[in-house]
Amino acid sequence: MAACVSRVELSVSCRSLLDRDLGSRSDPLCVLLQDAGGGRWAELDRTEKIKNCQDPEFCKKLVVDYYFEKVQKLKFGVYDIDNESFDLNDDDYLGGIECTLGQVVSSSVFTRPLELKQGKPAGKGTITISAEEIKDTRIVHLEIEAQNLDKKDVFGKSDPFLEFYKQNDAGTWQLTYRSEVIKNNLNPCWRKFSVPLQTFCGGDFNKPIKVQCADHDSDGSHDLIGTLETTLAQMQTAGAGSLVEYECIHPEKKQKKKNYKNSGIIRIKSCKIETEYSFLDYVMGGCQINFTVGVDFTASNGDPKSPDSLHYISPDGINEYLIAIWSVGSVVQDYDTDKLFPAFGFGAQVPPSWQVSHEFALNFNPSNPYCQGIQGIVDAYRQILPQIRLYGPTNFSPIINHVARFAAHSLQQGTAAAPREALSQMVLAEVPKQLVSFYKWQGWPPLKLPEIKATQIQASPGYL
């Protein structure tokens, strides 16, 4: 039976967090971990850090795969971040909760009190989580500027930033994007930004969207400049020299001042919708990954006869290199139809001249370095190991250049080729992201078979 899996994004907010900083408020961040078994927890994702805030509403969504048939135990931890280190062990713990993903997705709003440890509340702190299935792979790209914003600072102008909210089914507003702060500027032009359409408006072009413009204060007490409401359908009319303008209205000023007009103008310069293709889209469109292996035969690996060497083949017939070849190759081979893989070595003295070579075929056939399947690579490696002398230095650029020539040849034939800079030292988990990123940069959508000939891609080797 096929697994029932969906991609969901989790929105997180907290209230009444503990204050761990002297002279200011905490700088919270939320991390999401999943039970990995044996009492271990593996980090899945984390939000951004929000400075000086005890009631944070995190903008970054936490993305996780949801399996209906599995009990997925999750842990949410909130930390006060006081340094730039990625490690959270030196940061103050503000509390957390443990729950299952099923509990979260089955609740419209999931709110729980934070605990420092089981049975010990983290003051009055609470965490609220809401889940939304990611069904739409489109992305909205926006360019926005403002004019004549209100001056909020005594000794300067204003430090404006934008926050976008979508209205959920309960009628409440949920943060979807927060812009950068532009210092001391009443006519700011914010950087172009992109938000998944699902996050931005739930895929509904007519869903109400609220935009809030505020003056940033370092202590977290931001001053409202004004707000506006719109829809994506309205914003989409911007572009090609046509701007969409909105009055930025401060509700209290509008109510108190008879001659109040606005607190500035927000202008949509550009609003575009694009499809975000996945790795699977390209695979199902015929993408082929041509796997090339480069093996390090430098003396730094140690004497192959010594058990301490990475090239030492144990009595059961394996070593670190063979494990790596099998681990990566067994996955990648499914995406290559002919199962013919070029395999090279570098950094060794090779017969008959015993000159150092940084690009020699493992099968000693430079005109045809292809091995049949992963087993062919393994067999070639085992046969060549006792016939060469480990030497040096470490120089795998000739192998990368070799694969780059393959890629260039494919490009001349009109098929896709990936840049060696992006893929030359890839690890297996990076393959889908790198390929999709490159295709997106080229503006290439997935091909649809059988109407269009399959696309092929040459992937440079990650040396093993």
Image (cartoon, grey):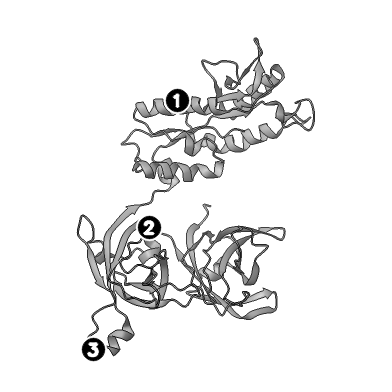
Image-based side of 220 in relation to 206, left or right: right
Comparing labels 3 and 2, the label whose residue is closer to the camera:
3
Spatial distance from mark 1 to mark 3, Cα to Cα? 72 Å
Q: Quadrant of residue 248?
A: bottom left
Quarter residue 406 falls in: top left
Q: Position of residue 55 (x, y in %)?
A: 52, 77
Question: Could you tell which of marks 3 and 2 lies nearer the N-terminus?
Answer: 2
C-alpha distance separating marks 3 and 2? 38 Å
Q: Residue at x 22, y 86 (%)?
A: 259
15 lies above or below 145: below
Secondary structure beneath dot 3 equals loop
- Labels 1 and 3: the sequence-earlier one: 3
At x 34%, y 30%, the residue is 414
Disc 2 residue crowd, few under 14, some 14–19, many 20+, Cα 10 Å: some
Q: Are marks 1 and 2 in contact (CB under 8 Å)?
A: no
Amino acid residing under circle 2: Ser
Q: Nearer the viewer, residue 78 or 70?
A: 78
Looking at the image, can residue 167 be seen? no
Nearer to the camera, 351 or 257: 257
> Nearer the observer, disc 1 or disc 3?
3
Q: Which residue is mark 1?
A: 405
Local packing at callout 1 (Cα closer than 10 Å; few below 14, some 14-19, many 20+) is: some
> For the residue labelled by badge 1, is the local secondary structure a helix, a strand or a loop?
helix
The answer to whether residue 123 of the structure is visible from this angle is yes
Q: CA distance from mark 1 to mark 2?
A: 35 Å
- The residue beneath circle 3 is 258
Q: Residue at x 35, y 61 (%)?
A: 190
Q: What residue did someone put label 2 on?
A: 194
